[in-house]
Amino acid sequence: MAILSQYLASYDLNDIQASYESKENGQWISPKECEEFGKEDDNFIFALLNEGQFCHKWSDSLSQYLAIKYDLNDEGRSRTMGDPLFQKTGFEIATASISKQYFNFTPPHPVDRNLIKKYGIETFLGHWLPYAALPNMVDDGEFQHFREELFTALNEQMPYICEAINRDYLRLELNGLINGNKAPARFREKIKELQDSNDKLYRIWSKREVFPLPYDISNRERIRDTFISLN
């Protein structure tokens, strides 16, 4: 039986024995006991699940994330239906707010390699994928190309975007439809968040997030439920 371990990549029992004997502390299972592992053993299940990660699909888009929302006051909410101020200026109308997209950009999407269909196993956490398939999910060069194009376009459009946001903000405020809105500053905050978090930016672009098993062996029942769904 192969020994699943993130620390020792070997099938040789002599190597495993030597590694075991070199550790003076910690809780270890003797190599002699390895043959006793079975499919129902919690340690085996946990080790097997940790030989891959889970891929969760996201529906958030860049345009949705960068859209600016204006919270309406009572007067604003009463005028959303049929008012030309909202109808002719590109606002999306919700119950208590309106929003608008100011950034014009078509992101280059990652190449779909169908790895989830080929290697993924669907679970309630998302599709489980073995580590061997994960490096090929999205080419890092593709993501870096998207990142460079995005922030180049943002730098070019930023003066016009800020001018448009301020113009809409002042118009809504003068018409008594909003109170103390922070929309003009919020757009720059969102850009800063994307610059500081590659994980967030990657998730928005690729429409997915990859993460390891989110609990440890003390949660045996949840681990077992996940493992059963892989069979």
Image (tube, rainbow, N blue to C red):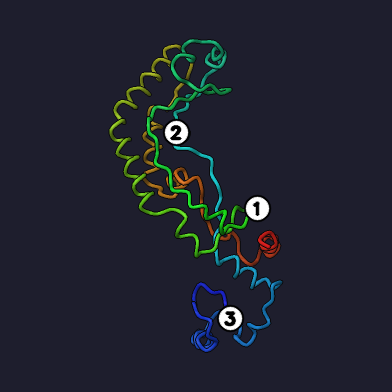
Residue to which mark 2 is pinned: 63
Tell me which numbered mark, 2 or 3, is placed earlier along the sequence: 3
Q: Amino acid at mark 1?
A: Phe
Residue to which mark 1 is pinned: 124
Is the C terminus in the top left, top right, bottom left or bottom right quadrant? bottom right
Provide the secondary structure element on which disc 2 rests: helix
Q: Is residue 228 above or below residue 24?
A: above
Q: CA distance from mark 2 to mark 1?
A: 28 Å
Instruction: For the residues labelled 2 and 3, say whether their Cβ atoms are less than 8 Å apart.
Output: no
Instruction: For the residues labelled 3 and 1, say whether their Cβ atoms are less than 8 Å apart.
Output: no
Q: Is residue 106 above or below residue 111?
A: above
Q: Residues within 10 Å of mark 2 (few under 14, many from 20)?
A: some
Tell me which numbered mark, 2 or 1, is placed earlier along the sequence: 2
Q: Residue at x 40, y 54 (%)?
A: 139
Left of 10 or right of it: where is 126? right
Res. 78 image quadrant:
top right
Res. 2 image quadrant:
bottom right
Left of 52 or right of it: where is 101? left
- Look at discs 3 and 1 and give the one toward the viewer: 1
Left of 41 or right of it: where is 70? left
Q: Residues within 10 Å of mark 1 (few under 14, many from 20)?
A: few
- Look at discs 2 and 3 and give the one toward the viewer: 2
Tell me which numbered mark, 3 or 1, is placed earlier along the sequence: 3
Q: Amino acid at mark 2?
A: Ser
Q: Is residue 57 above or below residue 103?
A: below
Point out residue 54 in the picture as x, y percentages from the top left corner: 56, 56
Point out residue 152 in the picture as x, y percentages from the top left corner: 29, 39
Residue to which mark 3 is pinned: 28
Q: Amino acid at mark 3?
A: Trp
Q: Residue at x 69, y 72 (%)?
A: 39
Provide the secondary structure element on which disc 3 rests: loop
Camera-side residue of 194 and 15:
15
